[in-house]
Structures are given as C-alpha cells and as structure tokens.
Amino acid sequence: MAPPLDALDRKILVALQADAGQSLDEIARAVGSSKTPVWNRMRKMREAGVIRRQTVELDAEALGLEACFFVLIRTSEHDASWQRAFLEALNRRPEVMEAHRLAGDIDYILKVRVPNARAYDTFYQALIADVRIHNVTALLSMEEIKATTALPLGGPVD
C-alpha cells in the first residue's frame, strides 16, 4: 500500500521529476518550504519506496540511437519456463528500453532503441534465436511527439 502523500510531498515529487539535479535549496524554494522539512520528506519517501532512484535523461539521437521501434510480439508459449527465458533474453539486451505484457491479441510490446534498421535486425535475429516467438511486428517511430517519465501528480499543466 502506498504511503499517504500530502500536497507538499506531491510538490516535492513534481520538482524532482522536473529536474532531480536541483539543489535542496532550489527544491525547497520551488515548493515553498525550508530545506530541513523537504530533506526529511525526501528521505521518508525514499525509505517508503516512493522515490526509487535518481538518474539522468540522455538524448538518444545525440548518442547515435536514432531509431525507435515498437515491437509487437505474439507467442504460442505461455508456460513459466518460456516466460523466464524471454525475460532473461530481454534483460540481456540494453536496446530494450521498455517491455510490457499485454491483455488482448498481442502478448508483449517492447520499446527498442537502436542506431538504425540494420541494428534492429541484429537485435531481432538474436531475440528469435534465444526464444521461440510465434509472430513479431516491428513499428518504426517516425517522430516522437511526447515522451516523459514524469508521473501525473499535479494534474494537467496549462
């Protein structure tokens, strides 16, 4: 069960999601509080698992990872050993940015970042060599219109 969060906790989380590299002074100023209560609340949210980690966001294209594919996977295998092998195969591949098990006609969707189509094919060949997959459809993203890791804590922004 999630710990109860008040308005100040939510403001702190919104500020951290916007830029976790801000100083404690900047966060406290942004949320209208002083450093000590903000620090204590951040510490409690870390301990409770609300804040899992702090990281940096990199520009994929600036790093040569210009192709983003959404990979739709259907499988006829649903037993625990296949699922373990599939998860292990995904975890070995840093190109897989996200993986979701779905309800409906498609069993899994992957978000894969690679330099180009040839690199995607290399990824695809390695994946199907590791696990048996009934059907794979790859969709190339032509343009990223919106991307965020920020959870909707403060409602829509005008």
Image (spheres, rainbow, N blue to C red):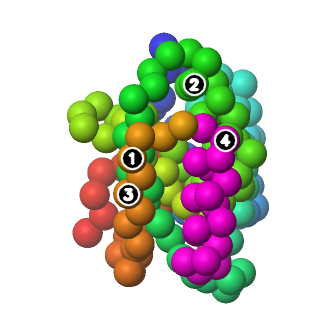
Q: Give amino acid for label 4.
A: Asp
Looking at the image, do the residues carrying marks 1 and 3 touch, with CB atoms under 8 Å apart? yes
For marks 1 and 2, give the CA distance.
Answer: 15 Å
Query: Of the residues under marks 3 and 4, which one precedes in the sequence?
Result: 4
Residue positioned 65% across, 29% down in the render: 85
Query: Of the residues under marks 1 and 2, which one precedes in the sequence?
Result: 2
Residue 135, numbered circle = 1
Residue 64 in picture, x, y percent from top left: 68, 83
Q: Give amino acid for label 3.
A: Thr
Residue positioned 54% across, 37% down in the render: 132
The rendered magenta stretch, by its main secondary structure, is classed as: helix
Number of marks in picture: 4
Disc 2 target residue: 82
Query: Of the residues under marks 4 and 1, which one precedes in the sequence?
Result: 4
CA neighbours of label 3 inside 10 A, class few (<14), some (14 to 19), many (20+) = few
For marks 4 and 1, give the CA distance.
Answer: 14 Å
For marks 2 and 4, give the CA distance.
Answer: 10 Å
Query: Of the residues under marks 2 and 4, which one precedes in the sequence?
Result: 2
CA neighbours of label 1 inside 10 A, class few (<14), some (14 to 19), many (20+) = few
Residue nearest the viewer, comparing 34 with 115: 115
Disc 4 target residue: 130
Which residues are drawn in magenta? 115-131
